[in-house]
């Protein structure tokens, strides 16, 4: 009862007593921000650097792989021979739609709609699984066409970058499924929507990483860039500058 | 005890939750789908490849998608600005890493085996 009075006093801006009651249940950070959400943003910031390094590695090695091929030193299929743009566009669309269902799950729990939460979380996990299935099929078809992790430097950098992204998606799918199970046991209340929001931040991050990968890995044609670079080098060599 | 009182006893407040409605989220998803379709469409148009406009166009479109997802779906547009600075700091460092590594590897070529990748033995 005393706690309820204190809470109501806080609700009306009464100040200290209400704050003490709140602090007794939930330790508040000195910044006024939720520590768990801030921690998730810090993790995502560090993950940006992780994927930044992988993307840089891919950009360097793929360009090198194209130039090695032009110099007659490369082996195995290259990106322009093997990447399937229409197929990957559908995968990108699936992941974008999973971001929509994730945000709808959060909106549902913020309104106290438990069923909506479970439906949208389930849909997000399903779309994530479809994306992973697509990636597995893509990796299998590349392997059949002769591109493996150690075939050439394009294969090594491609599988490392997209594989780590796939691992992130897998973790996300398990996280979403666990949230659905916890929700079925009545463990996700409206006042605990932050738990869903934090999972959502992770999921949307996986989506934005794919936005970058889709453009840099699949859409940008490195063969023309490599050809121009190679021709420029030959030109420099002819005039004695190479 | 009222729902409002329960909510106050629950999670710490961010004072930042003026999130968009479901209709806005659906419109944003539609926008993202259209931008993705444009990205794929311009990849098929030969003029973009020949004129050198492909890479800048794709960069602009993917940045637009990135900013939209981060701003609306991740709520950075509506949340406390300190979350924004936290994420931006990591993102700026990541862009710096990519830029530095690409410049470094372009100016100092890697030797694969005994031969230089440029073909000059």
Image: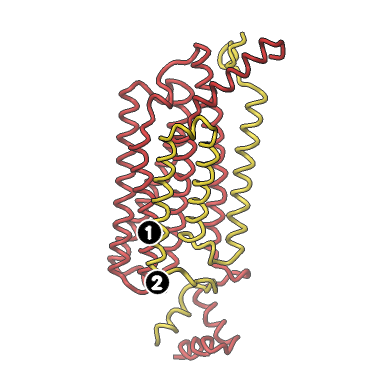
Q: Which residue matches tag 1?
A: A102
**Residue at screen point 54% across, 26% down:** A225
Cα–Cα gap, marks 1 and 2: 13 Å
- The foreground one among A143 and A92 is A92
Q: Is residue A33 left or right of residue A150?
A: right
Q: Which residue matches tag 2?
A: A110
Quick one: which chain is yellow?
A: B
Quick one: which chain is red?
A: A
Q: Could you classify mark 1 by the number of other residues whose Cα lies within 10 Å: few (under 14), some (14-19), or many (20 or more)? A: many
Q: Quadrant of residue A147?
A: top left
- The local secondary structure at tag 1 comes to helix
- The foreground one among B52 and A48 is B52
Q: Is residue A226 left or right of residue B92?
A: left
Point out the residue furthest to the top here: B121
Label 1 resides on the chain identified as A
**Residue at screen point 49% across, 43% down:** A212
Q: Quadrant of residue A88?
A: top left
């Amino acid at each position: 009862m005393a706690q309820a009075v204190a809470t109501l006093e806080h609700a009306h801006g009464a100040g200290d007593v209400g704050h003490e009651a709140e602090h007794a249940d939930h330790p508040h950070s000195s910044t006024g921000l939720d520590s768990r959400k801030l921690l998730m943003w810090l993790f995502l910031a560090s993950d940006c650097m992780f994927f930044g390094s992988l993307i840089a590695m891919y950009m360097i090695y793929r360009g090198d792989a194209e130039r090695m091929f032009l110099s007659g030193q490369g082996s195995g299929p290259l990106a322009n021979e093997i990447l399937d743009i229409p197929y990957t566009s559908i995968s990108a669309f699936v992941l974008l739609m999973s971001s929509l269902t994730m945000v709808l799950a959060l909106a549902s729990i913020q309104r106290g709609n438990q069923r909506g939460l479970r439906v949208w979380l389930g849909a997000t996990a399903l779309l994530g699984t479809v994306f992973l299935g697509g990636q597995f099929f893509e990796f299998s078809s590349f392997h059949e066409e002769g591109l493996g992790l150690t075939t050439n430097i394009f294969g090594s950098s491609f599988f490392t970058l997209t594989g780590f992204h796939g691992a992130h998606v897998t973790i996300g799918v398990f996280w979403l499924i666990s949230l659905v199970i916890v929700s079925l046991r009545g463990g996700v209340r409206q006042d605990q929507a932050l738990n869903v929001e934090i999972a959502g931040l992770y999921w949307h991050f996986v989506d934005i990483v794919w936005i970058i990968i889709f453009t840099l890995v699949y859409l940008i044609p490195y063969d023309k860039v490599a050809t121009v670079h190679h021709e420029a080098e030959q030109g420099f060599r002819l005039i004695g500058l190479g | 005890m009222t729902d409002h009182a329960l909510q106050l006893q629950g999670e710490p407040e961010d004072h930042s939750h003026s999130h968009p409605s479901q209709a806005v989220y659906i419109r944003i998803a539609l926008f993202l789908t259209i931008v993705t379709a444009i990205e794929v469409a311009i990849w098929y148009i030969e003029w973009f490849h020949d004129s050198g406009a492909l890479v800048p166009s794709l960069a602009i479109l993917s940045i637009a998608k990135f900013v939209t997802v981060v701003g609306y779906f991740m709520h950075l547009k509506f949340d406390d600005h300190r979350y924004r600075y936290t994420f931006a700091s990591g993102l700026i460092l990541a862009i710096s890493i990519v830029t530095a590594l690409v410049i470094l590897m372009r100016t100092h070529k890697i030797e694969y085996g005994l031969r230089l990748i440029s073909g000059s033995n």
